[in-house]
Amino acid sequence: MAIERTLSIIKPDGVQKNLIGDVYRRFEQAGLKIIAARMLHLTTAQAEAFYAVHRERPFYKDLVRYMTTGPVIAQVLEGENAIETHRKIMGATDPKKADPGTIRRDLAASIEENVVHGSDAVETARQEISFFFAQADVCPRTR
């Protein structure tokens, strides 16, 4: 199995509802290590740039607006098959379709306010991590 890194974001609804510890606990219990983290309030320009891949989709403007409503926490997770593991922990985008025990099924209010974001592939993860973190800000675990 491959050791990977993935970007994870606790979205404004997750931060506002004080779900940070619960979300982190789920990552760690699944064997993922948090190797970088920061809280920030995205500007409109930052949210537009981060979600540019969705620019032509009908939900793009609402997504940008939502992601700028409050602080988020961006983190880099590392572990065996981190991308797939993280996506399983998150659950389906629509909480109604997510498996029981996943973050979105247990904690999300709606498809729009679904608590977390995660990279979907190795290359996407590289791009998304570099959007939020300089290489010097990522601290691989040494013990």
Image (tube, rainbow, N blue to C red):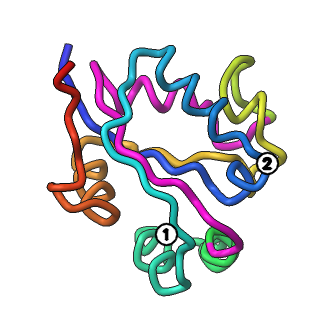
Q: Which numbered disc flags the more N-terminal residue, 2 or 1? A: 2
Mark 2 vs mark 1: in front: 2
Q: Residue at x 33, y 58 (%)?
A: 128
Q: Residue at x 70, y 48 (%)?
A: 14
Determine which residue is flagged by label 2: 17
Q: Amino acid at mark 1?
A: His
**Residue 36 percent location from the top left of the image:** 33, 45
Q: What SS does tag 1 mark? A: helix
* Other-residue count near label 1 (Cα within 10 Å), few / some / many at <14 / 14–19 / ≥20: some
Question: In this view of the protein, which residue sits in the foreground, 58 or 44?
Answer: 44
Q: Is residue 57 above or below residue 37?
A: below
Quadrant in which residue 66 is drawn? bottom right
Reading the image, the residue beneath label 1 is 54
**What is the quadrant of the N terminus in the image?**
top left
Residue at 51% x, 67% y: name it: 40
Query: Which amino acid, mark 2?
Result: Lys
Image coords of residue 18 (percent x, y): 74, 45
Would you identify the image quadrant in which residue 91 lies?
top right
Q: In the drawing, does residue 95 fall left or right of residue 41?
A: right
Q: Residue furthest bottom?
A: 45
The one nearer the camera, 132 or 125, is 132
Q: Which residues are magenta?
A: 68-95
The furthest residue to the front: 143
Measured along the vertical axis of the image, is residue 29 above or below residue 96?
Answer: above
Q: Which mark is residue 4?
A: none
Residue under the image location 20 percent in, 24 percent down: 3
Question: Is residue 6 toward the left or the right of residue 58 in the image?
Answer: left
Of 26 and 127, the residue lying toward us = 26
Residue 28 place in picture, x, y as percent: 47, 21
Q: Is residue 55 magenta?
A: no
| Side (left or right) of 121 relative to 104 | left
Task: Decide: is 82 above or below 76.
Answer: above
